[in-house]
């Protein structure tokens, strides 16, 4: 079985689907981690790629960890604590590192439950759109563990300190409407409109110059980690690159000539 399905259309939209519905698309096992890495790296290397839509097969987006393998000696856990630590570092922690380094924008179409590491996977994406049946939970505490995949860093940056603490310390479910209210997702749509909506957002992204989109994403990512003076320096450097592109010249010319631009990704 192909654990991550990936398809690129003529507009450069790469639709990736976590494809292990029997485990509700658990992402803690190494084969799933490697499959997602392979799909992302292939998309990043493909010059046709403009934006990724990430979703899940079946009724869940992702259940996070594989509960059946959470006993001692199963999955990431090991009787020797040092080995468990190494398993996390060489396993699921590869995902936040990869998403942080990506240049392609990622639109997450949350089709169902996003639990634990599954919730954190949505946080690694850039835009989150929820179907009306979506549910979220930072539920590690209910299993007697902590967010081991970067959730403690990601969640407060998305929903703020108080709501992040409430979610992480209670482990309670958050439905789609509440997720929208706290900024966890940007919108909630009827279930049968989820992928069409995600594609509509993706198309609005692809309508803009490729290099400007990628540089803007990198700048937004760095802005969460740098001081104002540092981000101003980074912005100036990125702006120098953007001004040198043919697409920038075309954008200015098209605006002056009051016509639609024809970008070429250069």
Image (cartoon, grey):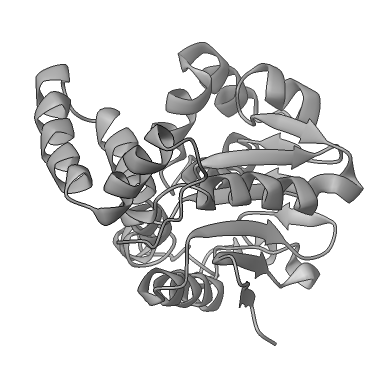
Which sits in the foreground, 127 or 216?
A: 216
Residue 109: x, y in percent? 69, 49
Q: Is residue 227 left or right of residue 247?
A: left
Task: Tell me which residue sits at (53%, 46%) in the image.
Answer: 205
Residue 128 image position (x, y, % from top left): 62, 40
In the picture, the quarter occupied by the N terminus is bottom right
Residue 141, image quadrant:
top right
Residue 166 sits above or below residue 188 on the image: above
User: On the image, which quarter does residue 42 sit in?
Assistant: bottom left
Residue 182 image offset from top left, x and y in percent: 63, 18
Can residue 118 be seen here? no
Q: Is residue 156 above or below residue 192?
A: above
Locate the C terminus by quadrant.
bottom left
Residue drawn at 69 percent across, 66 percent down: 68
Quarter of the image holding residue 21? bottom right
Q: Considering only vertical position in the picture, is 140 above or below 101?
A: above
């Amino acid at each position: 079985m192909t654990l991550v399905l990936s398809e690129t259309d003529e507009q450069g939209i790469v639709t990736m689907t976590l494809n292990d519905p029997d485990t509700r698309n658990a992402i803690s096992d190494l084969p799933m981690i490697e499959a997602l890495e392979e799909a992302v790296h292939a998309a990043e290397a493909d010059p046709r790629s403009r934006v990724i839509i990430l979703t899940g097969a079946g009724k869940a987006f992702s259940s996070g960890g594989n509960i059946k393998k959470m006993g001692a000696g199963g999955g990431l856990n090991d009787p020797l604590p040092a080995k468990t630590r190494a398993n996390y570092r060489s396993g699921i922690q590869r995902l936040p590192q990869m998403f942080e380094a990506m240049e392609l924008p990622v639109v997450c179409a949350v089709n169902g439950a996003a639990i634990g590491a599954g919730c954190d996977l949505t946080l690694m994406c850039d835009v989150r759109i929820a179907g009306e049946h979506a549910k979220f939970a930072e539920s590690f505490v209910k299993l007697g563990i902590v967010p081991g995949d970067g959730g403690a860093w990601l969640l407060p940056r998305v929903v703020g300190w108080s709501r992040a603490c409430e979610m992480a310390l209670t482990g309670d479910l958050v439905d789609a409407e509440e997720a929208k209210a706290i900024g966890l997702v940007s919108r909630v749509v009827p279930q049968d409109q989820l992928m069409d909506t995600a594609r509509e957002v993706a198309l609005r992204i692809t309508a803009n110059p490729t290099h400007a989109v990628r540089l803007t994403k990198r700048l937004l990512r760095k802005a969460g980690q740098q001081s104002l003076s540092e981000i101003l320096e980074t912005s100036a450097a990125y702006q120098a690159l953007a001004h040198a592109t043919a697409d920038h010249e075309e954008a200015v010319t098209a605006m002056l000539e009051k016509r639609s631009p024809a970008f070429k990704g250069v």
